[in-house]
Image (tube, helix red, strand yellow):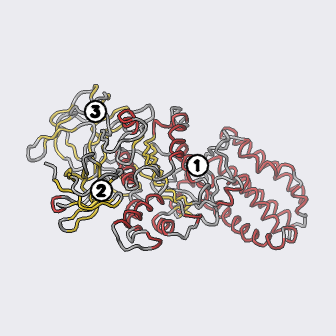
Amino acid sequence: MPNSSEVIWVSGPVVKASGGRALAMYEVVEVGADRLVGEVIELIGEVATVQVYEDTAGIRPGDPVAGQGAPLSVEIGPGLVGRIFDGMQRPLTVLQEATGPFISRGTQVLPLDREKVWSFTPRLKAGDAVQGGEILGVVPETAALEHRVLAPPGVQGIITRIVPPGEYTLKDPITQIRDDRGRETPLYLWHRWPVRRLRPYRERLLPAEPLITGQRVMDVLFPLARGGAAAIPGGFGTGKTITQHQLSKWCAADLIVYVGCGERGNEMTGILTELPNLQDPRTGHPLLERTVLIANTSNMPVAAREASIYTAITLAEAFRDMGYHVALMADSTSRWAEALREISGRLEEMPAEEGFPAYLATRLAEFYERAGPVVTLNGERGSVSVIGAVSPPGGDFSEPVTQHTKRFVRCFWGLDKELAAARYFPAINTTDSYSEYAEAIQGWWAEHIDPEWGEMRQATLKLLQEDYQLQRIVKLIGEEALPDSQRLTLEAARWLKEGFLQQSAFDATDMFCSPAKQMKMLSLILDTHRRARAVLNKGIPLYQIREIPELGELVRMKAKWGDAELAEFDGLGETLKGRLEALGT
């Protein structure tokens, strides 16, 4: 029977209730006659503090509070992919059918459709031993992805019965397990898992492969490992959301979990209208067929932002346990932190930096540490890569959320407002950004793409750093006052920035760049710079080098030739080599 108590105090989304000894920490409760969903976040004696995930207008002392005897959990089963949920995993399309375009308070719907029929094919048979995390069978969920039905972690025993291949609903038991005590337990196509508890795995692996994104500045200069964690901080209008859209479409992940946490409603509307029309380059089907969307916009109750983050990461872990490589896009963790600050303020807790709670760093660490490549309980390899957008006020990277995030991620893509204003995208500032995964994934690049990837990356970073220092001098005395050797550095850096790092999301050829093409382009630019410097050292003035007409192709080649025309890069290299050697003779 649910435990009962009553409201004794209300402040916005925070409610205090009597009967706290009958409730458990993080237990789900229902508040008031409308049965508003909340979660216990503090227990002191007989008083329980609850954060309510819905609008508390009209709640008053004396209203009932009923404990549900379980923590906040998500349902894991077929029917997740291609759908849009709110922070509590309520499907928004079902809510719209039930209440119209505006969500009524207290509306409760099941996350997964119990009546829909799924085609199930078992992988095990009667008499097989099974343990938690084992793949019981598969369901073709979409054309792009099959759902692998997992035994819930913690289950162990012998299969006494399993259904034959056929059509089943989520209400139908698909197998019966007998444990060592002789107890029979039915298993279904779905199970529940608490969102605040990490899903178990057999072994955690070190990142060793890159998460290829098709974006040159990321893949080459600041790579993210598969199973790594990255942050995209930037002020308003710098392209955080668009960058995550690009990554969602092109990154080498089997499944995308996109959570809009506290962002503007029109941004989520754009995602919801664009994704069904976007073609998945991997399968040719709509991108939505390998995407799970969690929408918790800024006009939704503030406390639900925390639930949305945990719901998203738990769903990502579930697909990881099926043996998939999952990319989680969190947009943005700053709005989540602001929700923590508001709840903390209403609890009258001692504030830390800029009013954020003292446990902000702990919560960020708990979130990002759930990323990683693992060996699952069933022996498969899967990963969760977390890419979190950060929205520092005024683009100030010294504020607490950005600074704490930097402590827990190893890849940092800092967006620059000046670059964005100049229509330079991705607006990643190469001076502020870094990646600590480069050494770990260098072996993969050397084995599969180019053994000189590490050397070329270091040469590129060195050239860009020299350009950064020279640009500060140019602002004072002008470029014409520099010697030709330094002006050549500026010229080569321009080839890099405009011909390699800048990339158009709207150009059919340039929107995605394969690793092979990336290396062809970068090698061509660096070789041309090296040969030009050798000619310059022979006394040939820079203006004669600049007059070589083919140098303009270094900026245009990114959109001119695709992956099927890699030989064209070699041809351009030979032409430039001949032109430069002719100058030096």
Q: Which residue is mark 1?
A: 242
Residue 493 falls left or right of residue 280? right
- Tell me the CA gap for discs 2 and 1: 31 Å
Mark 1 crowdedness (10 Å alpha carbons): few <14, some 14-19, many ≥20: some
User: Is residue 381 in view?
Assistant: no
Front one among 265 and 402? 265
Instruction: Kindly indicate the quadrant of the structure image that contains residue 176.
Output: top left
Specify the amino acid type for callout 2: Arg
- Tell me the CA gap for discs 1 and 3: 36 Å
State which mark lies toward you, 3 or 2.
3
In the image, residue 206 lies at what x, y percent?
A: 42, 59
Image quarter hosting the C terminus: bottom right
User: Is residue 77 in view?
Assistant: yes
Specify the amino acid type for callout 3: Arg
Front one among 106 and 183? 106
Residue 84 falls left or right of residue 490? left
Marked residue nearer the N-terminal end (3 or 2):
3
Give the numbered dot on residue 197. Answer: 2
In the image, residue 82 lies at what x, y percent?
A: 43, 37
**Above or below, comparing residue 427 to residue 111 in the picture:** below
- Tell me the CA gap for discs 3 and 2: 25 Å
Marked residue nearer the N-terminal end (1 or 3):
3
In the image, residue 347 lies at what x, y percent?
A: 33, 67
Q: Secondary structure at mark 3?
A: loop
Q: Which residue is mark 3?
A: 114
**Above or below, comparing residue 576 to residue 286 in the picture:** below
Marked residue nearer the N-terminal end (2 or 1):
2
Whether tag 1 and tag 3 are in contact, CB under 8 A, the answer is no
